[in-house]
């Protein structure tokens, strides 16, 4: 999911996302814009803060994060899952207090993600 701000105005005052103009939402993915909005264009499925979802035409979505941020977070998450599933790693690091455990795990996960991104950049043709 990516963060975005909904920008307006909308042509239709009955539009389900009109209450989100100027607010941050999460873009879950692409939706069936032609059938949903009768535009034939691209539409995104967005999630409000309360968890409810709505469709919005692409021209009303302004992304506020980059795909690189999302990729970094996904790589860090995968690294963290791998570290947590490794009993040797967790038993060694668990000797510290809980707050330090989380701090170390988080820092090392981000370091792994950054190293992977740096290596991928080097290998681009």
Image (cartoon, helix red, strand yellow):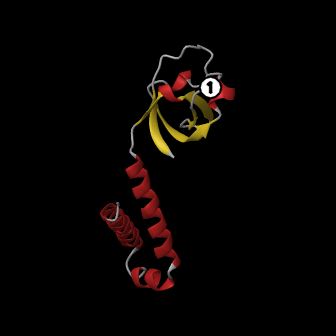
Q: Decide: is 93 above or below 65.
A: below
Name the residue located 48 percent from the left edge and 26 percent from the top edge. Answer: 59
Q: Is mark 1 on a helix, strand or loop?
A: loop
Residue 51 visible to an observer of this rendering: no
Q: Decide: is 1 above or below 124.
A: above
Question: Could you tell me residue 56's position as x and y percent?
Answer: 56, 28
Of 120 and 13, the residue lying toward us: 120
If the image is split into quadrants, where does the C terminus sit? Answer: bottom left
For residue 94, what is the image quadrant? bottom left
Of 99 and 65, the residue lying toward us: 65
Give the side of residue 4 with respect to residue 50, left or right: left
Of 107 and 76, the residue lying toward us: 76
Name the residue located 65 percent from the left edge and 22 percent from the top edge. Answer: 38
Question: Could you tell me residue 89's position as x and y percent?
Answer: 44, 82
For residue 116, what is the image quadrant? bottom left
Question: Could you tell me residue 123's position as x and y percent?
Answer: 34, 65
Give the side of residue 110 with respect to residue 19, left or right: left
Residue placed under numbered mark 1 in the picture: 40
Question: Could you tell me residue 114's position as x and y percent?
Answer: 33, 63
């Amino acid at each position: 999911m990516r963060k975005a701000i909904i920008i307006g105005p909308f042509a239709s005052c009955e539009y389900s996302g009109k209450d989100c103009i100027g607010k941050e939402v999460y873009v879950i993915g692409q939706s069936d814009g032609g059938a949903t909005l009768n535009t034939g264009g691209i539409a995104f499925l967005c999630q409000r803060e309360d968890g409810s979802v709505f469709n919005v035409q692409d021209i009303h979505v302004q992304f506020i994060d980059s795909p690189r941020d999302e990729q970094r977070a996904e790589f860090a998450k995968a690294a963290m899952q791998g570290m947590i599933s490794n009993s040797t790693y967790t038993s060694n690091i668990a000797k510290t207090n809980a707050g330090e455990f989380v701090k170390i795990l988080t820092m090392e996960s981000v370091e792994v993600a950054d190293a992977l991104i740096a290596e991928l950049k080097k290998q681009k043709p």
